[in-house]
Image (cartoon, grey):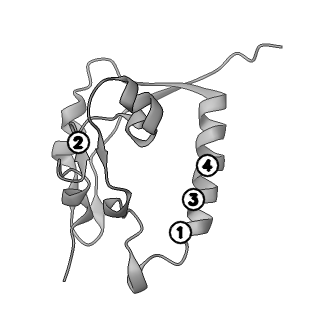
Amino acid sequence: MTVPPYAMHRSPHYFSPDPDRFWPNRWLAGPAAKEGVPVVTDRSAFIPFSAGSAGCVGKPLALVELRVVVALLVQTFDMRLVAGYDVKQWEEEFHDYFVARKGELPVVLSCRVLKS
């Protein structure tokens, strides 16, 4: 049996309301509940590294590396999409075969000014 993670991660059955919206607070019980919306986040349905015996053996290392890289990027750069970019274009150009092929995502990085 094959489970398509892309489809499952966008199912309102597992992630609602609005599973397509970028909403990091959905993973935090307190802030999401304060917004007054019943929130469904089924952590067992979130399988970016697959699951079971076919799960990625590099998952623990990948998660540590992701935390370090994201923290460094957020600390070092201000990020925004290129002016006039249609956010829906990225999803429309995303094709998930066995290996995902994604479209262009034009992002502008500008160095932050460090305050002392």
The residue identified by callout 1 is: 59
Residue 16 tag number: 2
Residue ID for mark 3: 63
Question: What type is the residue that disc 4 sits on?
Answer: Arg
Q: Quadrant of residue 90?
A: top left
Say if mark 4 contacts mark 2, CB within 8 Å: no
The N terminus, quarter of image: bottom left
SS at circle 4: helix
Q: Secondary structure at mark 3?
A: helix
Q: Is residue 3 visible?
A: yes
Label 4 near label 1: C-beta < 8 Å?
Answer: no
Task: Nearest to the eye among marks 2 and 1: give it.
Answer: 2
Along the polypeptide, which appears first: circle 1 or circle 4?
1
Residue type marked 3: Leu
**Total residue callouts:** 4
Q: Is residue 91 above or below residue 11?
A: above
